[in-house]
Structures are given as C-alpha cells and as structure tokens.
Image (cartoon, grey):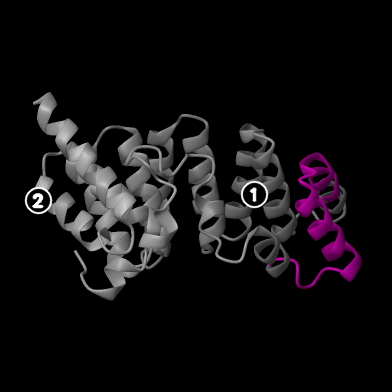
Amino acid sequence: MKRGSAARRFLTAVAACVAIAGCTPAGQILFSLLPDGTIPMLLSHLQRESDTNRRRVAELEQKGDWQGLVNLAEENLALQPNNVSWWLVAGYANSRQKNHPRAIQCFQEMVRLEPHAADGWNFLAQEDRAMGEPQRAVDILARAQPVLRDVPVTYLLLGESYSDLGRFELAARAYQQALDLDGGLTPAWAGLARAYIKIGRYADAESIARAAEASNPQFAAAIRDEIRTAKNIQ
C-alpha cells in the first residue's frame, strides 16, 4: 500500500463517511468522482455540438430536469444514432431518474461505438451494480480490462463489485490496483479499509486509520469502530 502524502490526499473527501460501509453508494460512485461536477463532464463530450445544445444540457442538468435531458438526448439521437456523446447524456439522465435498464442500453451503445473508451464500460458496470447485478458488473469489467488496464476507476469499480458479492480478498486486490494507479482515489481507500476488516487484516486497516488520524479523525475513528465490532463478533 502506498504511504506518505499520496496516501493522505483522500482524507478531506471522506469527512461525511461515519461508517466504512456505505461510503460509495452503487448509484453514485462514478458521478461523485467527477472533481468539477457533471456539467463539465457532459460538455466535454459535446464539444462539436452547437452552443444552443450545450447551453440546454447545462441548464437542464443544473435544474435536475432529468426527463428534459432525456428528451433532448433522444431528439438528437434520432438524427445522429451513432453519436456517442448523446448516448452518454441519455445514459446519465436515465441513471439519475433511476431508469437503470434504459441507462444500461445507452451505455451499451457507447461500448459498441467506442469499445476502447473507458467511460462506456465503467458507466455500464456501475449501472449493473445499481440494478443489483454485481456479478454482471464483474464480467463486464473483466472484458474491459485488456483495454482499460491503466484506468484506476475500472479497478475501483471491480473492487466495489467484488465487495457487493462478499468476495473481499478479490475486492482488496482490486482496490490496491486502483490505488497503485492513483493514490488519491478516495473511495478506494474506504473500500480497502472495509475489505481488510472483512478478511481480518486488522493491522492493515489500522494503518489506513493512522494515516487518516491527523486530517480526518472522524474517518479514522470509523475504521477503528469497525475493527472493534469485527473483533467482538469473532
């Protein structure tokens, strides 16, 4: 596990996590990893679109008008069925409405049209997790790894999916792979601590708590509470 400043960059972002479990809800993890928010992410995929369309996307996202955003995307897809950017917008908006089956269809189209791009695969796996299908998410990410082996979020999602399945040894390995690629990937530290506790590697979980102590005592305390609870159950 990486140590030092890289191991501590995650601390401020986990202040709201009062327990290890549940820090990364299945339907939110990818959106929560966008440092500048979802509007810049969406607009970055729509650089070739008209200013009118780009403004409309931003306005609808800001208002939380997910059905309006779905309608806008579908209107454009009727004219441009092979436009990956509009499939992304449609998938995102459907996901926010919890219409996960339709979001999955949208992200499947992204993967079909751009099989070497990370976004489609990762969003597709995340939607399967949101649908309560973590094994399907694992299978999708396994298919994606030959082309996404250097994408830390892919390994984070793999760790989350294995955690959903209760396969914590494999989850710990996936979280560590994510952190090897990006030591500041916040949810991977929380997931790794959780996995270590589940498999009885309390000293390793304690080392994460120690790194958190100065900057985020709440998170460190949560780890230690989970360790104590796990030991008492034994």
Binning the other alpha carbons within 10 Å of mark 1 as few (below 14), some (14 to 19) or many (20 upward) gives: many
**Label ID, residue 109:** 1
- Residue farthest to the top? 233
Q: Residue 183 carries which label?
A: none
Question: What's the residue at 69%, 40% (across, down)?
Answer: 94
C-alpha span from label 1 to label 2: 44 Å
The reply to whether residue 43 is visible in this rendering is yes
Q: Which of 128 and 98 is in front in this view?
A: 98
Q: What stretch is highlighted in magenta?
A: 45-72
Q: Label 2: which residue?
A: 203
Tell which circle, 1 or 2, labels the residue nearer the N-terminal end. Answer: 1
The image quadrant that residue 64 belongs to is top right
Tag 2 secondary structure:
helix
Image location of residue 153, percent across then percent down: 42, 58
Q: What residue type is labelled 1?
A: Glu
Residue 234 at x, y percent in the picture: 8, 26
The relative height of residue 201 versus residue 209 in the rendered view (above or below) is above
The residue at 87%/48% (across/down) is 75
**Which type of secondary structure does the marked residue at label 1 adopt?**
helix
Residue 26 magenta-highlighted: no
- The amino acid marked with disc number 2 is Ala
Task: Note whether 63 is above or below 128 in the view shown.
Answer: below
| Residue 171 appears in the rendering | no
Image x and y of residue 9, in percent: 36, 68
Residue 15 position (above or below residue 233)? below
Q: Local crowd at mark 2 within 10 Å, few (<14), some, or many (≥20)?
A: few
Farthest residue, direction right: 52
Nearer to us of marks 1 and 2 is: 2
Indicate whether residue 51 is drawn in magenta. yes
